[in-house]
Image (cartoon, helix red, strand yellow):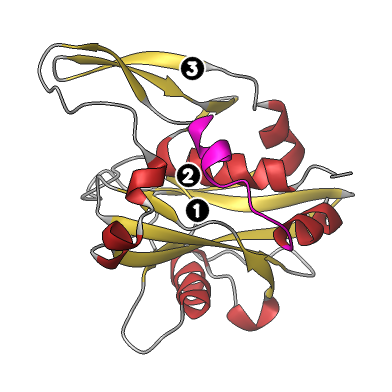
């Protein structure tokens, strides 16, 4: 699986094709005519990217019992943009640091992954998140052993250790219809037991699943 990811990172990334599989879309619109499925191509334009803040997240794989796992976090309810949502460790880029450094620093601050223990494999497609005006830069890395988790309770409500094969099995077209204000929206979800992953994190993980597949 890791070899497939390495190989696929060297060719054209699936990006928008993967994201669209998990894109929220309106099914009934009574209030806001601009409420529509996100146009990732439009939001990924150079002009929009220039005006967006930068953040980075880390998919950090470790192996246990012949399986690959990686951590997700549950954001606290006081989080301004994504309260209570499932996310990858990560956060905003600071002055005078690279995006890779941001991903490593934030992962250490949030869940205790030591930067020196991580071997970065590569970077996935930058993902625009218009609701928070961020461009998210996802990195993939590995550690030799499971990290010694240490949660920052100000930023992390809970830690979820997810088996990668469980994520792949949940890529089955499941969705739920939600009501947001006066609009009905259709939300594609990775549903793994009582864990619901949707939105930006689901888009990143959708590309990760595609990268893990063997290419001819």
Task: Find out whether the residues at labels 1 and 2 contact each other: C-beta distance under 8 Å.
Answer: yes
For disc 2, the marked residue is 201
Does label 3 or label 2 sit earlier along the sequence? 3
Q: Residues within 10 Å of mark 3 (few under 14, many from 20)?
A: some
Q: Is residue 15 on the magenta stretch?
A: yes
Does label 1 or label 2 sit earlier along the sequence? 1
Does label 1 or label 3 sit earlier along the sequence? 1
The number of callouts visible is 3
For disc 3, the marked residue is 175
Q: Secondary structure at mark 2?
A: helix
Q: Position of residue 86 (x, y in %)?
A: 44, 42
Q: Residues within 10 Å of mark 2 (few under 14, many from 20)?
A: many
Q: Give the side of residue 196 with respect to residue 12, left or right.
A: left
Q: Give the side of residue 71 with respect to residue 187, left or right.
A: right
Circle 1 or circle 3, nearest the eye: 3
Q: Is residue 148 on the magenta stretch?
A: no
For disc 1, the marked residue is 88
Q: Residue at x 49, y 33 (%)?
A: 20
């Amino acid at each position: 699986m890791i070899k497939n990811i390495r190989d696929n990172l060297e060719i054209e990334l699936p990006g928008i094709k993967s994201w669209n599989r998990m894109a929220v879309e309106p099914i009934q619109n009574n209030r806001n005519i601009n409420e529509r499925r996100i146009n990732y191509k439009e939001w990924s334009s150079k002009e929009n990217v220039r005006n967006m803040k930068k953040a980075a997240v880390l998919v950090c794989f470790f192996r246990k019992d012949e399986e690959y796992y990686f951590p997700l976090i549950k954001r606290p309810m006081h989080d301004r943009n994504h309260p209570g949502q499932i996310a990858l460790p990560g956060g905003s880029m600071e002055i005078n640091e690279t995006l890779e450094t941001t991903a490593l620093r934030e992962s250490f601050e949030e869940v205790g992954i030591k930067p020196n223990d991580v071997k970065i494999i590569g970077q996935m497609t930058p993902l625009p998140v218009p609701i928070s005006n961020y461009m998210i830069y996802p990195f993939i890395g590995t550690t030799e052993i499971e990290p010694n988790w240490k949660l920052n309770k100000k930023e992390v409500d809970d830690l979820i250790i997810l088996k990668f094969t469980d994520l792949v099995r949940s890529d089955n077209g499941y969705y739920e219809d939600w009501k947001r204000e006066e609009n009905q929206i259709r939300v594609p979800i990775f549903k793994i037991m009582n864990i619901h992953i949707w939105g930006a994190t689901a888009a990143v993980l959708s590309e990760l699943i595609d990268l893990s597949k063997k290419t001819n």
